[in-house]
Image (cartoon, rainbow, N blue to C red):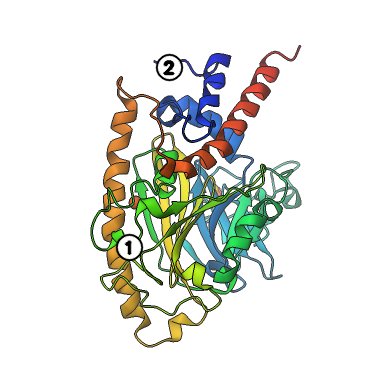
Amino acid sequence: MTKIFNDAFFNSLDSSILPVDEAEMLPPACYTDANFFEFEKEHIFAHEWLCVGRKEWVEKPGDYFTGMHMGEPFVVVHGRDGVIRAMSTVCQHRAMLVAEGHGNTRTFLCPYHHWAYALDGQLIGAPAMERACKFDKADIKLPNFKVELWLGFIFINLDENAAPLAPRLEKVAEVLKNYDLENADTSMDIEEQTFPWNWKVMFENNNDGYHANRLHAGPVHDIAPSDLCSFPDDLPADTAGYYRYNATVHADASFNPTLHALLPVFPKLTDEDRNRLLFANVPPSLSLIIRSDLVAFIILHANTHDTITAKRGWLAAPGAKQTPLFEEKLAINLTTSAEIAAQDIHVDELIPYGLRSRFAVRGRYSWQERAQLEFNSWLVPRYKAAWEEMKKAQDPA
Ligand code: FES
Ligand SMILES: [Fe+2]
């Protein structure tokens, strides 16, 4: 059993942020240990910006959707005043959840004893509480979280002192500019699934071009062979996200049986854009898989050390939904994507067995896996800073 909370363990993480030809993966315990997940929960998820959805999911006043990240239930709601807010759904009476699923509402009425909360979280109704001493509805509010919109994605942060996200995503936003994701067409049909593996297993799979023409070998995926991958060198050190490219064997390559874009191509793309795939990641919860006519997004909600909920959706060029046979063409793309995703899911499913094995090692990387180094470079400094904080808290002297 690896001992985790000691200097030797945290110093050993340094070998995961060496240049790609020297680095090794994180220790298996980072993926398998429940206490390590508690550490991530406290020191990463509770302070980082977490992507939770799209602005189109709460288009009109009163629209809301719920979710759960690291076991924290939350709701995102479009207020009557036009403000998009996020807050805990934990009833401040006896902890029932005041909202589930999604919909449109005027208030959040807790189903248990009918305490009612306004869309900003303020308690506005509490039946038969008039005899409770020193009880004032005005003092009670659902805890609100910070909210930031980035390219139409809604991010929340449980840390009220968190620095804004967008300034640390400028480089990634610049690379995504031609896709105009803020105005993209999308749909509320989100595929949501819970899986039995650690969040990093899935994040790394989304992040991995090395397996492209190996695990996914076959005519549909061979349009983007792994040896045509490339990685930028211009990301700032404090970047909150990163990206990589994979050139394609022809322009407007897309994952469907025709091997070409079927939907309208994002209109502002350059020839360069149209001859490559783009993969962008904003850890710990957003991955984008981008081709000329369709962007797939995956939002990951870590639940426990060995379970994760993934929400998958798509974005198309502004106005694409109005073009003839859009739904039919989209369905063709989604069928192929599901076949590819099934191969990834098979891997994600078996890796946890490997990681829990006594024979698991800290494996080495191919040059085609450089994006894993970007992820490690996001994680390791956070892990190490958190460990230093923990030590100080244990021994303030
Ligand atoms: S738990 Fe919500 S009203 Fe009682
Ligand atoms: Fe894959």
Viewer-proximal residue among 387 and 89: 387
Q: Quadrant of residue 223?
A: bottom left
Q: Is residue 388 left or right of residue 362?
A: right
Q: Identify the residue at image location x=54%, y=46%.
A: 283
Amino acid type at circle 2 is: Thr
Q: Is residue 366 left or right of residue 115?
A: left
Q: Is residue 295 visible?
A: no
Q: Identify the residue at image location x=53%, y=73%.
A: 269
Q: Is residue 40 above or below residue 54?
A: above
Q: Is residue 323 left or right of residue 39?
A: left
SS type, badge 2 = loop
* Disc 2 packing (10 Å; few <14; some 14–19; many ≥20): few
Q: Nearer the viewer, mark 1 or mark 2?
A: 1
SS type, badge 1 = helix
Identify the residue position indicated by label 1 in the image.
223
**Which quadrant is the N terminus positioned in?**
top left
Amino acid type at circle 1 is: Ile
Identify the residue position indicated by label 2 in the image.
2
Q: Is residue 40 above or below residue 121?
A: above
Measuring from the top left, give residue 233's x and y in whole percent.
Answer: 59, 47
Q: Identify the residue at image location x=54%, y=18%.
A: 5
